[in-house]
Amino acid sequence: MAINSVRLVADAYLVCITHALSTEREEVMGLLIGEVDEKQVSHISAVIMLRRSDKRPDRVEISPEQLSDASTKAEMLAKELDRPMRVLGWYHSHPHITVWPSHVDVQTQAMYQMLDDCFIGLIFSVFNEDKNSKQNRVQLTCFQSMNYGGQYERVEVPVHIVPSSGIGSPALDSLVELPRILSMEEEEAYNQTTREKDLDLITKIQNASVYTKCLCHIMEVMSGPLIQSLENRLKMNQLKMEQLLQQREDLKQRLKSVKNS
């Protein structure tokens, strides 16, 4: 196994889980950005959400163009953060099903590892009810594929969530980008229906209504809470700033009294 363990920064985890919880009807996906150290530990510090060209309840696909764009973004992040950064893996959601990768997931992972043996996969199981507590739970697994006798099987990789003091700029940019990605997906699906020439007026009105409803749903469950969360964080930061300014004034007074004495 190429990777010994994975360390996922908390704000990158927040982006992944927010993306996974954005829909319970289809799977969502994205790419993981970071670096691998000399001990073969993968450090994930940023996430790139991907727009789905085809919504499926049980499968996601990453196009070569999306991988190329992600590599370019990783290079830009490397310059911005002044440290090595590259695409280290992918993540996707499993709504209403087990966290374990399907045989398709294992085959897809094996294909990526042919390009990079350090490539890892994360799966977030969401909207999955616990049989005992009857409450929805979120599960996470990290895996790679290994060839055993000509057949690929999953191998679990230990994953650790690394605490962070706040939301970094890359994670914040991804969270802000999410409503736009979801809106673009809905717009593309709606535009496909408008290309059909033999639709009657009632069907056209129905399609437009569904599209409007989807946009309102995105605003309700994503944009609204995100804005509220950012406003709360702004208030917290302003309060901390006031406290720091007060501490600075107190220190100035103490230094002044020490000099006078």
Image (cartoon, helix red, strand yellow):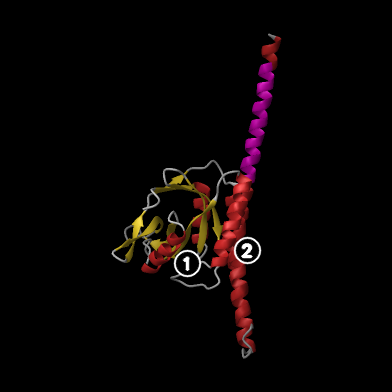
Residue 58 in which image quadrant:
bottom left
Magenta span covers which residues? 233-255
What SS does tag 2 mark? Answer: helix
Q: Is residue 141 left or right of residue 64?
A: left
Q: What percent of the width, then of the height, locates residue 104? A: 39, 69
Q: Which residue is mark 1?
A: 27
Rendering coords of residue 59 (x, y %)? 45, 70
Would residue 254 be seen by someone viewing this image from the given angle? yes
Q: Provide the major secondary structure of the magenta segment.
A: helix
Q: CA distance from mark 1 to mark 2?
A: 17 Å
Circle 2: is it few (<14), some (14-19), or many (20+) Cα within 10 Å? Answer: some
Look at the image and tell me in which quarter the C terminus lies.
Answer: top right
Which amino acid type is shown beneath numbered disc 1?
Glu
Residue 180's disc number: 2
Give the class, few, some or many, for how many residues have Cα within 10 Å of label 1's Cα (few <14, many ≥20).
many
SS at badge 1: loop
- Quarter of the image where one finds residue 210: bottom right
Residue at 57% x, 62% y: name it.
68
Q: Tell me, yes or no, whether the highlighted magenta stretch contains residue 239.
A: yes
Question: Going 52% across and 42% down the picture, which residue do you hit?
Answer: 164
Residue 103 pos. (x, y %): 36, 68
Residue 236 drawn above or below residue 46: above
Q: Residue at x 59, y 72 (%)?
A: 186
Quick one: label 1 or label 2, which is nearer the N terminus? 1
Magenta stretch holds residue 80: no
